[in-house]
Image (spheres, rainbow, N blue to C red):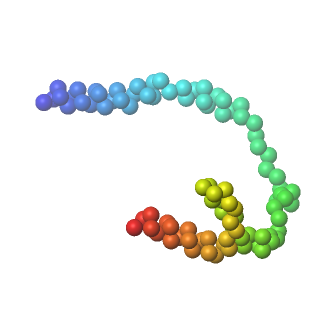
Amino acid sequence: MKKIFLFLFFIILCCFLIPILFTMQFSAISSMAEAPKIEEKPPEETTAPTQYDYKQYNVVKVLHTKTGEIEEIKLNIYMELYQQKCLLIFI
């Protein structure tokens, strides 16, 4: 019985030791030391817009792949249809 436990222990130990031995961790550490430093920009230099025009996002253009038509649907209606479709998938 002891031989079986020792054999299983040896197999499990080998399963963990073999990947450790064949991993190239030393080269990864040396390449990390040579990585260029990224400079952070001060918040004043960011070019993020401060105000958005939400009126342009009221319409969704849907492409019908079979007919090739582009249909414009209001965003609220599109979201309701999408939620109903998702609910049908999960039921």
> Residue, x 40% and y 67% (percent of image)?
91
Near-viewer residue (26 or 62): 62
Near-viewer residue (84 or 30): 84
Residue 73, quarter of the rendered image: bottom right
Asked if 52 appears above or below 63 in the picture, the reply is below
Residue at the left extreme? 1
Residue 76, quarter of the rendered image: bottom right
Near-viewer residue (38 or 54): 54
Asked if 69 appears above or below 83 in the picture, the reply is above
> Residue, x 29% and y 28% (percent of image)?
11
> Residue, x 81% and y 61% (percent of image)?
48
Q: Where residue 27 sits in the image (x, y, percent)? A: 60, 26
Drawn side of residue 60 relative to residue 42, left or right = left
Drawn side of residue 16 relative to residue 83, left or right = left
Residue 8, quarter of the rendered image: top left
Q: Where residue 9 sits in the image (x, y, percent)? A: 26, 31
| Quadrant of the snapshot with the N terminus | top left
> Residue, x 76% and y 40% (percent of image)?
37
